[in-house]
Image: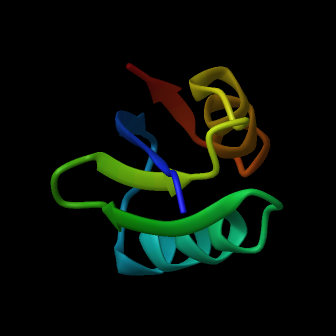
């Protein structure tokens, strides 16, 4: 199965609860297979189906109340 991996910067996470919540939001989104989110590093590694764009990942992160950047 072909997959795409995005490494993104995430602003606004202040604790482990933030990263856990964002991981759940991402992984429950269609086309996203896995998310590894670190509040300490302010980063996320998101594995998706090829049809999911980086912009789509940003929109999901932003809709969860955080700010995503490449």
Q: Is residue 16 left or right of residue 20?
A: left
Residue 39 sits in quarter: bottom left
**Residue at the extreme left of the image, as rendered:** 41
Say how the picture is coloured: rainbow
Nearest to the observer: residue 66 or residue 8: 8
Q: Does 43 appear above or below 54?
A: below
Residue that protrudes farthest toward the front in the picture: 1
- In the image, 20 versus 12, the foreground residue is 20
Q: Is residue 43 above or below residue 51?
A: below
Instruction: List x then y, in percent, for residue 40.
Output: 18, 60
* Near-viewer residue (37 or 27): 27
Q: Is residue 4 above or below residue 9?
A: below
Task: Residue at 41%, 36% (x, y): give it.
Answer: 11
Residue 69 in the image, given as x and y percentages of width and height: 43, 21
Task: Identify the residue shown where x is 74% and y is 57%.
Answer: 31
Rendering coords of residue 4 (x, y %) = 47, 43
Q: Left or right of 32: which side holds 59?
A: right
Question: Would residue 58 be found to the left or right of residue 40 on screen?
Answer: right
Determine whether, in the image, residue 6 is placed left or right of residue 28: left
Image height of 66 relative to 30, above or below: above
Task: Give the x, y percent position of residue 58.
Answer: 62, 31
Q: Quadrant of residue 19?
A: bottom left
The C terminus - image quarter: top left
Q: How many badges with numbers are in the image? A: 0
The residue drawn where x is 36% and y is 78% is 16
Image quarter of the N terminus: bottom right
């Amino acid at each position: 199965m072909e997959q795409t991996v995005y490494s993104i910067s995430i602003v606004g996470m202040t604790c482990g609860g933030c990263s856990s919540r964002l991981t759940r939001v991402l992984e429950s989104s269609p086309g996203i297979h896995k998310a590894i989110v670190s509040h300490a590093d302010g980063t996320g590694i998101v594995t998706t189906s090829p049809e999911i764009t980086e912009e789509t990942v940003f929109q999901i992160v932003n809709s969860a109340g955080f700010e995503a950047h490449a």
